[in-house]
Structures are given as C-alpha cells and as structure tokens.
Image (cartoon, rainbow, N blue to C red):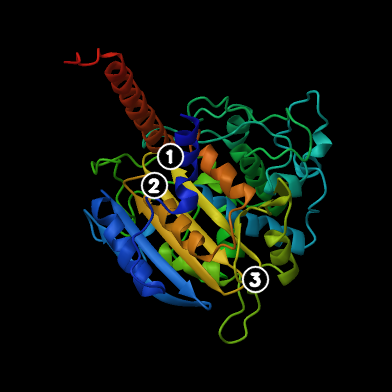
Amino acid sequence: MLAWAAFVIAMPLLGIGGLKLEGTGSEAFVKAARDAARDHRGNLALVLIEDGKIAQSRAMSIGKPVSGDTLFQMASVSKWVTTWGVLALVDDGRIDLDAPVSRYLTRWQLPAGDHPTDQVTVRRLLSHTAGLTDDLGYCGFAAGTPIQTLEASLTKAADACPLRTGAVAIEADAGTWRYSGGGFTLLQLLIEEVSGEPFADYMERKVLVPLGMNRSTFRTGEEGRSDLAQFFDSSGGPAPHNHYTAAAAASLYASANDMARFAQAHMRGPRGEVPGRGVIAPESLQALQGVESRLLGMPHWGLGVQHFAESSRGGSIFGHDGGNVPAVSTTVRIEASSGDAIVALSTGGYTIAPKLGSEWTRQRRAGVTPAMIYGAVMRFTNPFEALSAWAWLMGGWTAILAASVLVARRNRLPSSPRI
C-alpha cells in the first residue's frame, strides 16, 4: 500500500501520464501537446519561446475559435505580473521592499494578534513568507453579483474557496512559507494607496502598455469583449465567468501573445533590449528571480515566482501556475539560462496547462528537487488536481486489496484429495 502511494506521488516526477514525445525540440513538443489536448473539452492557447524568440504558437477550441490574441483569465499567474507593478514602485523610490506594509496603508490595517504587524514587509508578501495564513484561494463572484471592496475582502473575503477562512491575518512567524492570495490583495491595496490610482489604471500605465501587452487588463466586467475566450466546465459545458475583487491575485486578462511578451521581458531582447525593458530595473528583475525561501535547502520561491527546478543548463526554471473556478488553468515558465519559455492558457479543465508546463520543465531539469517532491505531494490537497491524484491512489489500493482477498481465499481452499 505504501509502495503504491509512493508510486502515485512519483508519477509526475517520472513523466508517467505526461506527453508522448516523438523526438526533441519545439515541433515535437507541440505535436505531443496537440495529441494530449484531443480530449480537452475547452480552449487552449500555447506558445513556445526558444532563445528569446517565439518558436511555436498553437490554439484550439471546441467552441468559438481562439488564437494567440484571445484573452484568458490568468488566475494566479496574475501575481507575477502584479509583482512587476510593486517592483516599479520600489525602483521609483516610493516604497521600500523591506519596510512594513503598514507604513504605506491608511484604508485598512492588519488585525492585531500574537505576531507583530511589522513582520509583514513588502518583500515577504511577494514571497509568501510574511506569516499570513489565509491560504486564499478566491473562487470569485458570479456575474451580476456585486464584488466586495478591497477593505471588506481583506477583512473576510466573501468569495473565499471552500475550507478557507477568508480572513487575512498573521498567525505564523516571519519567514514561514505559506501561500497567501490575501497577501497579494494587500499588495493591490498598497499599489492604490501609494500611486493614488485605481489598481487597473496603474498596472496598465506602468507595466502592461510599456511592455506591449496592449490587450491585457486587470479591469473587471470584461465579459462583453469579443476577444475573450469562452468559459467551459470540465465536461465541456458552458460555465459562468466569475469576477474578482482580488484582481492582483487572480484576475489579469491576457492573451498568450501578451504573456509571451511578458516572458521575453525577463530576457535580453534581439536588438539588445535590457531585461526588464525599462519597466523595472535589471537589478529588480534579478531580485525577482532570487531565492527568498528554500525547501530542504533548495530554492523554492522568489519574489512573485516559484522555482520549479534547477535547469540542466544552469540556473533556475521559474514562473507561476494558476487555476480559477470554473475550470481555468494557466502556466508560464522560463528557463533563464537558455531564453526558453512556455505559455499555456486554457479553459475547460484544471490539468492541461500545468501538465504541459510540468512536461516542458521535466525535459530541462537537472534532477528532482525537494520543491518538486513537495509539489507532487501537494497534488492531494490542491483542489484543482486532488480528484485525479486521489482517483489514482484509491484505484490502486482497491485493486491491491481485491487481489489480496482473492489470494487469501485461494490459499484457504482445501487441497485436492490424494489418490
């Protein structure tokens, strides 16, 4: 039983259930991705970048056609783009990464408790090490339902996903890594307070438009746009389009081509453009890719990005995955040493985008890291992957128990009489 559990945990690390590749390179990957997506009941947009340039771009849909310019809700990948907005304020000298966030807030403050509020710095919020224990997890508001104010959402998010308290509070020591969507909602408030602008306005002016992400937006109420991907549930049926107060954490709308531009902005451009593209300083970009938390001594999280693996070419494979209700999944990952990247955006399922991202990472990793093992184990608690993981585990255990019962019964049968 324990051996089967270990096998199920190791499946993504071993590539079991991954893509069936016939060769190497981006063309082989795209072909395998297309085969894997045949049963996907929704939309998918995929872009592969090699040496800083777009090498492959594909899109598919069971409904209204999609392309590289179609907008998708980016889910938690939004946090990475929000991080650029925060670092732009740092570069402008308007905030200090290591200052308590409370220094800049007037509209809302963290509730007093057993831990000092001064431990909640901007840097720790970006790296999920501020000691916040909300575990958010926003499920959004249905169309026609008024969304909360930022202040009300921080006090208790009405759209918290099941098994989440929805309250943003400090309940762990500083430096303790704990994923916190609420921390990025607090950063959304920080941006509004310091810039004096609505969050979406600031992000468009300071980050999205300068990077050439002209279709992208953090604004709510985008359901009327003709270039928005349809929302499907996991069975391919029509699904509602949920809206979010916590736009910084969960609700950037962006196209695959715009996210490719975002990924390329982390690299030197073909005409010598500096990483950061003048939106954030190269030094801030290096800080983003740095290591703010470790898992068993190995890099785990930077500023707004996860370290997925060590690259076989040196350096890190970093980025972010995302999942929103109902059935939105996204992934953007970069191999800094090669200038390669993947962008995969989907509706209609929680697994296709991270599956493509994980396979792309597996081909490039130097080995299995503690963070990868941790991610494999956490599939059993991740609401977007738990059903599949538990199905494999329980199915195997059921088969083992059934086989054990049959063997036991056979052994108890009386032996044939001797003549």
Residue placed at 73% from the left, 27% from the top? 171
Q: Position of residue 202 (x, y in %)?
A: 61, 57
Residue located beneath label 1 in the image: 385
Q: Quadrant of the C terminus?
A: top left
For the N terminus, the quadrant is: top left
Task: State the residue at coordinates (25%, 40%).
Answer: 235
In this picture, residue 342 sits left or right of residue 144: right
Q: Nearer the viewer, mark 3 or mark 2?
A: 2
Nearer the observer: mark 3 or 1; the answer is 1
Mark 3 lies on residue: 276
Q: Earlier in the sequence, mark 3 or mark 1?
A: 3
| Label 1 neighbour load within 10 Å: few <14, some 14-19, many 20+ | some
Depth order, front residue of 418/23: 418
**Relative to residue 249, is residue 342 drawn left or right?**
left
Note whether residue 73 is visible: no
Q: Is residue 391 above or below residue 337?
A: above
| Cα–Cα span, label 3 and label 2 | 31 Å
Q: Which quadrant of the structure image shows residue 94? A: bottom right
Q: Is residue 289 left or right of residue 256?
A: right
The residues bearing labels 3 and 1 have C-alpha atoms spaced at a distance of 33 Å
Q: Position of residue 280 (x, y in %)?
A: 68, 67
Image position, residue 223 (x, y; %): 35, 48
Q: Which of 348/399 is in front?
A: 399
Label disc, if present, on residue 129 of the rendered structure: none
Tell me which numbered mark, 2 or 1, is placed earlier along the sequence: 2
> How many neighbours does mark 3 have within 10 angstroms: few (below 14), some (14-19), or many (20 or more)?
many
Q: Which residue is mark 2?
A: 351
Q: Secondary structure at mark 1?
A: loop
Asked if the residue under mark 1 is in contact with the one under mark 2, i.e. CB atoms within 8 Å, the reply is yes
Label 1 amino acid?
Glu
Q: Is residue 258 above or below residue 63?
A: below
